[in-house]
Image (cartoon, rainbow, N blue to C red):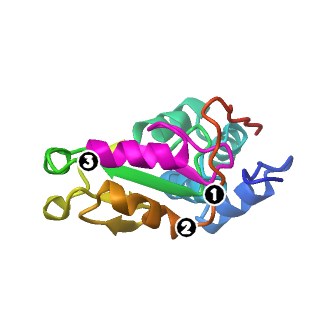
Amino acid sequence: MGALRRVDKNCACVESIIQSNGGGKDSLISILQDVQAEYHYLPEKALRRVAKNLGLPLVQVYGVATFFKAFSLKPRGKHLVHVCLGTACHVRRAPAVLAEVERHLGVAKGETTPNFEFTLETVNCLGTCALGPIVMVDEKYYGQMNVGKVKKMLAGYKKFSRPKRDEKIKVSA
């Protein structure tokens, strides 16, 4: 199975998620959140199953999935790393922090490590400007971040093997 969980042939997990959310059209966002929590992205097979079970056009399900930035149609890592590049963080050297995170993970912003352990993203503001620069890993905030703290912050998460820059991410749904 590897680090990336695949949608099984019968979409049993997706079926279970739909039922646990009541199976109604008004539960679409909750269903998509749970599907993404399970797979770390929204696989096409899962979106098709959700549309079919809720009696919604596939384009409507895709519309919701692409409207909200929290949803992703491509595989993401187990841990989401967000580096704030808002004004307050930017003037406090957030770009240098971002560069250090990129160096340690071996990926650029917007990319996922080949082992699907980390996805690195930037945001315009995390709402904690007084503590900037801010890095958020999953739901945990790391304030007053600097390049010297990056390695220790990442070490607190599952050990990862540093990928080579030219490795490609292989995805199969």
Q: CA distance from mark 3 to mark 2?
A: 21 Å
Which quarter shows the C terminus?
Answer: top right
Q: Which disc, if any, is residue 22? A: none
Q: Which disc, if any, is residue 157? A: 2
**Residue picked out by circle 1:** 160
Q: Is residue 18 above or below residue 157?
A: above
How crowded is the residue under tag 2: few (<14 C-alpha within 10 Å), some, or many (20+)?
A: few
Position of residue 33 measured from the top left corner of the image (x, y, whole percent):
53, 56
**Residue 82 in sight in this render:** yes
Viewer-proximal residue among 4 and 17: 4
**Residue picked out by circle 3:** 94
Q: Earlier in the sequence, mark 1 or mark 3?
A: 3
Q: How many marks?
A: 3
Q: CA distance from mark 1 to mark 3?
A: 23 Å
Amino acid under disc 3: Ala
Q: Viewed as shown, does residue 26 lie left or right of 16?
A: left
